[in-house]
Amino acid sequence: MSNQKAEFSEAEIAVHWREEPLISPPPQFIGQANLTDPAIFERMSLEHFPECYREYADLLTWYKYWEKTLDTSHPPFWKWFVGGELNACYNCVDRHLPGYRNKTAIHFVPEPENELIQHITYQELWVRVNEFAALLRDFCGLKKGDRVTLHLPMTAELPITMLACARLGVIHSQVFSGFSGQACGERIADSQSHVLITMDAYYRAGKLLDHKKQADIAVEKATQEKAPPGKVLVWQRYPGRYSAETPPVKGRDFIVNELLPKYRGQRVEPERVQATDLLFLMYTSGSTGRPKGCAHSTGGYLAYVAGTSKYIQDIHPEDVYWCMADIGWITGHSYIVYGPLALAASSVVYEGIPTHPDAGRPWRIAEELGVNIFHTSPTAIRALRRAGEDVPSKYHHHFKHMTTVGEPIEPEVWRWYYNVVGKKEAVIVDTWWQTENGGFLCSTVPALKPMKPGSAGPGVPGIHPVIYDDDGKEIPAGTGKAGNICIRNPWPGFMQTIWGDDERLVKQYFARYCKDKNSKDWRDWPYFAGDGAMQSSDGYIRILGRIDDVINVAGHRLGTKEIESAALTVPEVAEAAVVPIPDEVKGRVPDLYVSLKPGVTGDGALAQRISQAIETQISPVARPRRVWIVPDMPKTRSGKIMRRVLAALSTGGDPGDITTLANPEVVEKIRTQVAQR
Ligand code: WTA
């Protein structure tokens, strides 16, 4: 591949992968599937674009039908379903009451196995969302367009909070609960959130973690950035009992469960919002140090996740659907909360880790709840397989459909998922997409296309991918060459902008392959995804991984720059460079190289402090595998750190041509150092 950076990222996976044989979907799956009409591809071809997306928007209930399907007057800020009015909470809750009042909307499964599972019906969800929305409106004074940061763990209160915000037209910004207080504070400040909503504690790997202390750090950080939230609302993990160590701060922190009785029986009319009004922000990592807030619309986003949930996830109202992702990531927003609930499914929210207390836990949950659609990541699949190859065979769960998302999946791992977890009864979709996108971009349509282990498949209906080389020439299918995957056309799920930074949206995703920046024709604005990919002759696409400075650790998307800047806050550190290292379970883990300021020497204690700084500022998921304190960084003559060389040294590989470096001698020194460990 001509792109140098991609050489050391994930391309090596492709080299070892041969073309896999196709596997047909099981006939009993096809028999019941939502989408079995091959004409869908014709209906959603570019010829019928953009009107073809009416089909998705018509899955929703609108207060006012839209006037214009796609407005391209301000490229690349595409506007979908312009003039339409709707409410996301109404679409996910209220409209299901006549038909499904007593059906479970959310099964909340606590991590401790002796705690009862809560089955929250649509009626109960409606009541709880209304009461909490009344509290947000009347106690916090929140109104349409305000932002609220959520730092909530995986309990039922998280979707309840999101839906209550959506009911009021308040923009929620949920930060992954595993992220540190500082990371949360940064996001509060960036979004100028009026309120922070958190929980006192939650279970993780058998321990009740104090989570409220993160809120104290978050508020401190946001205050430093001159954007303190006005109030902090704290849900109790055990209503009526406060499980955190630090007491609530007077006048700032309020216990939700103490306030709620005042709002009992209150109902809040859903706010009619424009299709283009924002539903939520989701912060994600990019190639600069600061995370960016992907700003998702109400109408386009909800239409897109409802459509893809119906046709790719094959969700019917009678299905019990479990996506084991965290709602703190886009997968959880689209495919635990908004997509499944828009279709009146029962969606499982599981608090803990999949291997607690043992690797049989997911299958016991699936058995108990009758889960028939299962959705997870390659990292979780690898971890469960490692913890016991035969464990799933001991259980009586039956899936009709399974999903993998978030990272490339090795064909061998795919086959274990298919044979052992799915018992050869379930169809698998490998769904490729991103936070920015709102919903799936590449995947097979499960009843219409065969599966190919390790390949995401072609674009989903309505999505038209293309692979460009570095010069903007199309790489045809079947050439065996990798390039940069782009999407030719806009689609309704794509974000409206990056919060507060329109320019970055243009620069990051469109500048690279824009054919004419004065054009108002969407055909001139392909979307640049930032992933390397190759397409085999049958049109199936294999995703090779990021070509930018993003590292995907256990499916968590982290910026190498974010990790590096956290390391640089340690006073002794002069330079820092992160490289992704293959890991059997997590896919990738970061190795960190640092050089120290002149006159400073380092030891294990310093390395420990650097690791700690990363944990505190970002999250334990970002902790480096190793911190290498090196005499100098290998650099180009223009002073650029050669991460490719460091990556090769970390994995014992060949660093390639180093003669162009300004300091080639340092490579040998680092190699010796790494070899000694
Ligand atoms: C990677 C997660 C291979 C990819 C939904 C992308 C994948 C990044 C797949 C986005 C897949 C996601 N196969 N790689 N099926 N799905 N990726 O924003 O590198 O957290 O750019 O969204 O994950 O991660 P994000």
Image (cartoon, rainbow, N blue to C red):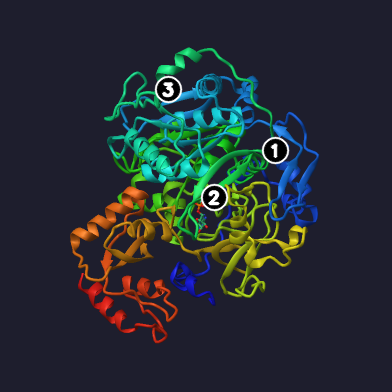
The spot of residue 631 in percent (x, y) is: 26, 74
Q: Amino acid at mark 3?
A: Val
Rendered residue at 35%/18% (across/down) = 240
The spot of residue 553 in percent (x, y) is: 40, 56
**Label 2 crowding class (10 Å Cα cut-off): few <14, some 14-19, many 20+?**
many
Secondary structure category for the residue under label 1 = loop
- Give the left or right position of residue 602, taking residue 545 as reference: left
- Which residue has dot 3 on it? 256
The spot of residue 528 in percent (x, y) is: 61, 62
Any part of residue 370 in sight: no
Q: Nearer the viewer, mark 3 or mark 2?
A: 3
The spot of residue 207 in percent (x, y) is: 27, 36
**Label 3 crowding class (10 Å Cα cut-off): few <14, some 14-19, many 20+?**
many
- Which residue has dot 2 on it? 435
Between discs 1 and 3, the one toward the N terminus:
3
Secondary structure category for the residue under label 2 = helix
As drawn, the label of residue 503 is none
In three-dimensional space, the C-alpha distance between marks 2 and 1, rounded to whole angstroms, equals 19 Å
In three-dimensional space, the C-alpha distance between marks 3 and 2, rounded to whole angstroms, equals 30 Å
Between discs 2 and 1, the one toward the N terminus:
1
Rendered residue at 37%/79% (across/down) = 655
Q: Is residue 50 above or below residue 361?
A: below
Q: Amino acid at mark 1?
A: Ala
Say whether marks 2 and 1 touch (CB < 8 Å). Answer: no
* Residue situated in front as seen by the camera: 114 or 423: 114
Ligand 1 contact, mark 1 (Cβ < 8 Å)? no
In three-dimensional space, the C-alpha distance between marks 1 and 3, rounded to whole angstroms, equals 31 Å
Residue 651 location, quadrant: bottom left
Ligand 1 contact, mark 2 (Cβ < 8 Å)? yes
Q: Amino acid at mark 2?
A: Thr
- Which residue has dot 1 on it? 275
